[in-house]
């Protein structure tokens, strides 16, 4: 019974597997392609001039993203639409193991892709090596070339997204600063049109000079009045004239002070030159701040464009898609050896269990 079980459960399955591997399974050819993601950085004129530093960085490795992409459904669908993977991998007839069922769904094709496309990734050197299996050497090479082209397109999309992200915030800030500067300049223009004044500081200086001149004239008139009071009689007409002159000068001084907003008067407070000048200064400060913000935003935008333009991602292929001359797959001896090992192990364990149960009876 032990010998019979060994023949039935070990030798016969081994013979069936050997017959399938050497008589039914078709030869498979392998095409290898290897590449890595490289980033070329060239110092720009803006960076050399202003000492611009890096504005953005990648939070995850481009190679890690590409490694995940190579096992996804999108690349399988894209290459299948271009090369017809279903037809390529279903060429051998009556092969239920290695051939693909042409009636299978996209999920089945993705599972078959995992078996026929083997991706190796070295995390230390960031190198990707892909081995593609097919039943014809040209088919394997075509799939490897398509994988390289799809990977290149993926990296180009990542580069475009990175460039847009690096300049989008700077562009938004620039647009905001431009609108702020326009509003500040329009406010200054409306103020000048409303008060019919180009620069209140000039009028302020003029009024201050006029007020100082009037103060000097008032002092001279008071001195003249005092001299006349000491040297003439009270009914001297020159005294009345001197007093009227002093009163006129004082009235003019009060009027000019009212315009400057120094003392009260008939002129409205909102029309006082000091109030107007204060409002104008506020508008000028807002305009200057908007101008400085605009200059900073423009510099940041130029720097972001320079930073985005000087960084270039690309795929560097250290192994071009190879064309096989000899079929190395399936590895028949290795598969037969592994199958035999597992069959012998299973048979041995079963025999031991059977003898153990027999002894316990």
Image (cartoon, grey):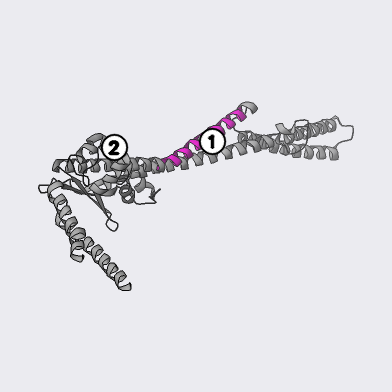
Asked where in the image residue 301 lies, by quadrant, the reply is top left
Q: Residue at x 52, y 34 (%)?
A: 179
In magenta segment, residue 181: yes
Q: Position of residue 108 (x, y in %)?
A: 30, 42
Q: Which residue is mark 1?
A: 180
Question: Which numbered disc covers residue 78?
Answer: 2
Q: Position of residue 58 (x, y in %)?
A: 38, 50
Q: Secondary structure at mark 2?
A: helix
Q: Decide which of 72, 339 is in the foreground and name it.
A: 339
In magenta segment, residue 220: no
**Within 10 Å of the Cα at label 2, are there few (<14), some (14-19), or many (20+) other Cα atoms?**
some
Q: Decide which of 169, 117 is in the foreground and name it.
A: 117
**Residue furthest front as drawn:** 361
> How far apart are the two marked residues, 1 and 2, measured between alpha carbons?
48 Å
Q: Secondary structure at mark 1?
A: helix
Q: Decide which of 250, 44 is in the foreground and name it.
A: 44
**Residue furthest left as drawn:** 325
Asked where in the image residue 94 lies, by quadrant, the reply is top left
Question: Residue 330 vs residue 346: left or right?
Answer: left
Q: Position of residue 5 (x, y in %)?
A: 21, 62
Q: Is residue 264 visible?
A: yes
Mark sitting earlier along the chain (1/2): 2
Q: Residue at x 37, y 43 (%)?
A: 162
What main secondary structure does the magenta stretch of the protein show?
helix
Q: Is residue 156 visible?
A: no
Which image quarter holds the N terminus? bottom left
Question: Residue 3 vs residue 37: left or right?
Answer: left
Q: Residue at x 82, y 40 (%)?
A: 226
Q: Residue at x 53, y 39 (%)?
A: 290
Please report the bounds of the magenta region as a residue range: 166-192
């Amino acid at each position: 019974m032990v010998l019979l079980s060994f023949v039935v459960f070990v030798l016969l399955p081994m013979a069936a597997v050997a017959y399938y591997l050497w008589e039914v399974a078709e030869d498979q050819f392998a095409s290898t392609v290897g590449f890595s993601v490289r980033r070329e950085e060239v110092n720009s004129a803006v960076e050399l001039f202003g000492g611009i530093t890096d504005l953005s960085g990648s939070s995850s490795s481009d190679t890690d993203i590409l490694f995940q992409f190579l096992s996804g459904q999108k690349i399988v669908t894209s290459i299948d639409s271009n090369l017809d993977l279903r037809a390529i991998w279903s060429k051998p007839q009556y092969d239920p193991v290695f051939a693909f069922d042409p009636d299978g769904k996209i999920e089945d094709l993705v599972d078959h892709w995992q078996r026929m496309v083997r991706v190796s990734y070295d995390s230390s050197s960031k190198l990707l090596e892909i081995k593609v299996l097919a039943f014809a050497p040209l088919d394997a090479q075509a799939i490897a070339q398509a994988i390289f082209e799809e990977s290149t397109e993926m990296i180009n999309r990542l580069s475009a997204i990175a460039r847009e992200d690096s300049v989008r915030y700077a562009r938004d800030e620039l647009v905001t600063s431009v609108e702020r500067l326009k509003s500040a300049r329009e406010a200054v223009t409306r103020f000048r049109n409303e008060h019919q004044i180009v620069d209140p500081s000039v009028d302020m200086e003029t009024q201050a000079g006029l007020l100082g001149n009037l103060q000097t004239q008032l002092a001279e008139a008071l001195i003249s009045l005092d001299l006349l009071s000491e040297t003439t009689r009270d009914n001297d007409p020159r005294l009345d004239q001197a007093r009227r002159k002093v009163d006129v000068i004082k009235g003019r001084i009060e009027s000019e002070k009212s315009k400057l907003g120094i003392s009260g008067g008939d002129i409205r407070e909102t029309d006082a030159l000091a109030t107007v000048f204060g409002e104008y200064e506020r508008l000028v400060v807002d305009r200057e701040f908007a101008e400085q913000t605009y200059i900073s935003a423009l510099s940041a935008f130029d720097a972001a464009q320079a930073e985005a333009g000087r960084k270039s991602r690309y795929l560097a292929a250290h192994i071009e898609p190879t064309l096989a001359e000899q079929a190395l797959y399936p590895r028949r001896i290795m598969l037969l050896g592994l199958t035999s090992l597992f069959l012998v192990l299973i048979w041995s364990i079963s025999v031991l269990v059977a003898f153990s149960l027999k002894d316990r009876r």
